[in-house]
Amino acid sequence: MKFGETFTEYLHGDQEGYLDKFSHVEYKRLKKVLKSCRKTCKSSSLIKGSDDNQEHHHDGDDAAAALSQFFPCQSCPLCDQMFFSELMKEASDVAGCFSSRVRRLLHLHMDSGLQKYVARLCQCFKNDQQVMVQEGRILFEYVTMNALAIRKILKKYDKVHSSENGMRFKSKMRAEHIEILQSPWLIELGAFYTNFAESNGGKSNELFSPVNYDLNTTEATMTLRLSDLVKLEYDLTCPICLEIVFNPYALSCGHLFCKSCVCTAASVMIFQGPKTASPDSKCPVCREPGVYANAVHMIELDLLLKKRCKEYWRERLVGERAEMVKQSKEYWDLQAKYMIGY
């Protein structure tokens, strides 16, 4: 089955009513644009080829193949006016929808007491575990299908235009932080999957995607297989202290750090948090500025490491608390001296 048919079947499947609330890549419509563009490019190439080769006669297929090699369509007014701008908007909407849905799911999982009771009421008295299982499966499938749709349509664009603009667009998506497969919320969803399965006796078969971990202290990784075509591997080692991330934060650029490490890099106190860093502060890895304001606290990932690496986690907790007390004392001593005037 072609991907276009698979994508349409996904949108109009059993979860159609639920998926109506989600943003999606308009794969079918964008494909029609490229189909029209292909006809335009082919006609232009054939006209140019007939002018330059009046003395030669070839079969139609041979001429089209030869001309596509010597006269590639590098610029297309039809596509350049709307294709990339609309795809950028759709990719941004998909990334925003995904992050908001994952946040909602994690709140349902992590909330306790009255908050969890209210959440259950909001779910119309459904079993909250059933709701979370269904939501987790839908979100994994949502990421997979839309990521594949973007990949397929960009590949088709490059094929039609004999260009590399589709690959450049992927780089732009990463720079704009709307590449859904690089979203820190996908790491959180994977950690949620494992935490939820372990809290329910290890029964994870109801969820969509298997998640594997290698928590070796030198090369800690998380592997997420969304489908046969999409396999992701995330490095869980802090690039500053070179140990497994503790109390992890993900910056907007996607890089993971321990909270204490990234606060030190941004010249802020641990108790203040990375979000209080200066707008000019740069990521210690990629040197991109302005990536601290929207830092994501990876609560599910931290819970996973707490369960899997108990001794290491306790040791890091003691160390971070001691450093927080030290920094807090120094901070308030300075404030007191400033207020007193000496």
Image (tube, grey):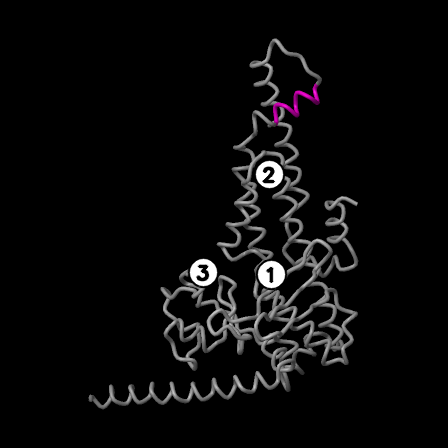
| 42 relative to 212, above or below | above
Is residue 63 located in the magenta-colored stretch of the structure?
yes
Q: Amino acid at mark 2?
A: Asp
* Mark 3 surroundings within 10 Å by alpha-carbon count, few (fewer than 14), some (14 through 19), many (20 or more): few
What residue is drawn where x is 70% and y is 53%? 229
**Please, is residue 338 above or below residue 29 in the view?**
below
The residue that appears at 52% across and 54% down in the rendered structure is 174
Nearer-N-terminus badge (1/3): 1
Asked if the stretch drawn in magenta spans residue 115, the answer is no
For label 2, the SS is helix
Marking on residue 158: 2
Work out how far the residue at label 1 is from the one at label 3, CA to CA, in angstroms: 26 Å
- Residue extending furthest toward the front: 218
Instruction: Please tell me whether mark 3 sits on a helix, a strand or a loop.
Output: loop
Please give the residue where the numbered disc 1 appears in the rendered image. Answer: 97
**Dot 1 or dot 2, earlier in sequence:** 1
Snapshot quadrant of residue 29: top right
Q: Position of residue 89 (x, y in %)?
A: 55, 50
Q: Amino acid at mark 1?
A: Cys
Mark 1 residue element: helix
Considering only order in the chain, which callout, 2 or 3, is on the residue closer to the N terminus? 2
Question: Which portion, as a residue range, is magenta?
Answer: 60-68
